[in-house]
Amino acid sequence: MKHFSTNNLLVAGIAVVLVAVALILMLSMRQSRRVKTTVALLDHTEEVLNEIQHVITISLDNETGARGYVITGSESFLAPLQRSEKDFRTAIAALQQLVSDNPHQLQWLDSLEAAINSRIIFSDSLVQSRKKSGLPATVTMVESGVGKRATENIRRIGNEIEKIEKNLLAQRKKTNDNSIKTLNQLLYIVLAAAILLGAFVVRRIRNDWNRQKASEQQFVELLDAAPDATVMVNDQGLIKRVNKQMKNLFGYSKDEISGQPVELLIPGEVRAKHIEHRHHFIKAPKIRTMGAGIELKAVKKNGTLFPVEISLSPIQTTEGLWVAASIRDITQRKQNEALIKKQKEEIQDFIDSMSTLCAKVSTSGHLLMVNKIAVQATGLSLEELLGTSFINGHWWTYDTKVHARVAAAFQKACSGVPVNYDECIFVFNQVLPINFSLIPIFTTTGEVDYIVAEGRDISSLKLTEAALQKQTEGLEKANKELEAFTYSVSHDLRAPLRIIDGYADILVEDYKDKLDEEATRIMGIIQTNAQRMGQLIDDLLNLSHTGRKELLHHPTDMNMLVKSVVDEQLSTATRPAVFHLEDLEPANCDSSLIRQVWINLVSNALKYSAKANHPEITIQSTREKGQFVYAIKDNGVGFDMKYAEKLFGVFQRLHKQAEFEGTGIGLALVNRIITKHNGKVWAVSEPGKGASFFFSLPV
Amino acid sequence: MEPNQVDILLIEDNPQEAELTIRSLKKHNLANKLLHIDDGAEGLDFIFSKGKYAGNTSFRQPKLILLDLKLPKIDGLEILREIKSNEMTKHVPVAILTSSKEEKDIIESYKLGVNSYIVKPVNFESFTKAVAELGLYWLLLNQSPDLPK
């Protein structure tokens, strides 16, 4: 039924109802006619029955009259008799008329008439007889029973006619009743159908109405839900309808603003112009945004201005052409735009403040952004540079090979590989070595979006490099000379010493008997000193050698190292000492050099505690933040802290040669080695209370 | 001394050094068949029967060559190389006797095939002891191969 529009349905419904009503009227009329017929029938039958009774009564009257006269002979009984005859005739006539439509009844009526006639005749004959013959003759006539029979017949026939008439009535009535019932049924059906249809139509109408109401409601809600304020203005410029946002945006309630001119929302100075525009728009209405390219402002109820974006749509309504304006508050957007602009400027300032040449280059090689230094470097202006192709920019090339290299590097960067290399390009009006960085920046999808090019003037760097190179070469040369020197020292200085010592020995040996005590002593001194010089040379050589050597770090088991050194030293010591070796932290160091350190420290400890009663030497280590500290403590002669600075100097000694022999190199060597390990050496002591030597190694 | 009965050949340019060395060896009776040549080139001539020593048909190779490194004209290492690269002479034990403790000298010498490298101590007593041990070892303890003819 859906494809029937409500209107059509309504019309059809009404038509049907009308038809139904007509039908009902028709049926009702038929009905009443039928009822009338029934009444007529009943009347008819009643009349017949009445007449029949009447006839019977007449016949009784007749009989009684006749009998009365017969008996009395009084003339007073003749009047009813005559009257009865007359009544008979009237009754018959009436009956004849009543049953004229029924031939069956007419036949009976004939019979009745015959019977009545015979009665009348008999009664008449009785009267005649009395008049003439007197009573006894008439009694004999009466006794014949003819009269009685005639009355009987009349009664009988009358009953018969009554019966028939009653049957007829019943029949006719039944037919009528049926017809009435049928009509009734039809009536009910038509009524029911009309009601159903009526109900259906009503429901449809009601649904439609509801739907319309709902869509109306939806429309209002939609309007209200819009984030922008919607204002509907009629062709006179009056506000006819607004949504909820009107209140939020402008501060007017729906009631306040309805009917007001729309110019109320527009800043005073442009109101007149707006009216003009409105008229133009009504003349040629189409959907568009308002004030393209102009900064639109609207005014709130409290008088504050705010920036807006307005779009207009013409709407044809029942009340004429309206304009629906959608007003968006773009204060936030304007603020964001301003913020973005500010940030952009900040970025530009930031990159302008950089001391390196910086540019943002598109993958096609065009300059998107250039910082101040870069602009200066080219000698052009920012406007001249922006948008131009970097690759084709001849302001920096001066050589095709250079150009090719830079172009190749740029291509590589565009393929997604960061590039960094040095190139000489023409900037700041000269050819300078520039270190180029080309960094590709990727989009979220992994493609190269643009390249950040950074150029650093490395001319000063190159100068420094050159100077450094020269210096290094100088140092290397010096080193080589030093090596040569050391070499010759080790060879050339030692040999004469050996010879001195050797010949002195020969002298002592071969001329033993010729030398006196003093001579021998002098020779001894010569020899001792020659040897000492040799030792000094060896120590010096060792020191310089160690100083020049490269460290070979590996994890070292300090316990094992120290133990072996201690055993070694003890085996050649003049006096044994008690050693307390605590658990030592392992370290990552050059174990052969550290061994040297321990050798010196342990031998020193032994040497300087040799004079103590119970020489005791303790070796321990601790772990402090970032380093291991090793300590060797003896209970020997100690030293004065006043001279502690001299401890680690070359050839510096704090004791006389006579007290303790030594070259004064040992601790200098220890210092050199530990310093090379980035550690520190120091000592703490008190004269007579032993000495504690510490060195640290980084973890 | 007959040239063909040299047990020890000492190539040393410094006469005092030589004297001390010989004295030490003498103390242990090892200097009997010792030949001292004070010139490197001459030393080579002797070894290869050239120049001054040419025509030495019945020359017998020494049991030990004591070589100093710092020699004028021809370097000690050069002499070592000559000796050790020649089929005729490379089997002869060569001990370098020098003041130099330089690592590179030691390495180079062993690379060239030196049999011993002794650093001469300054202390004469120690020197004597070292030389004696050296001599005793190479002459008495060590088995030299039979000399080719």
Image: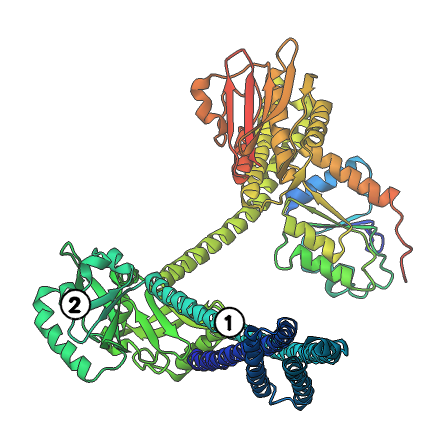
Q: Position of residue A425 (x, y in %)?
A: 35, 74
Q: Examine the rendering and report whether any part of residue A435 can be seen.
A: no
Q: Position of residue A683 (x, y in %)?
A: 51, 23
Tell me the chain of label 1.
A
Residue B63 image label: none
Q: Inspect the image, locate mark 1, and give the three-letter code of the amino acid beneath it.
A: Ile
Q: Examine the rendering and report whether any part of residue A430 can be seen.
A: yes
Q: Which residue is mark 1?
A: A195
Crowd band around label 2 with a 10 angstrom C-alpha radius: few (<14), some (14–19), many (20+): many
Q: Which residue is mark 2?
A: A262
Q: Position of residue A586 (x, y in %)?
A: 65, 33
CA gap, disc 2 to disc 1? 53 Å
Residue A307 position by quadrant: bottom left
Q: Nearer the viewer, residue B4 or A235?
A: A235
SS of the residue at dot 2?
Answer: helix
Q: Nearer the viewer, residue A533 or A385?
A: A385
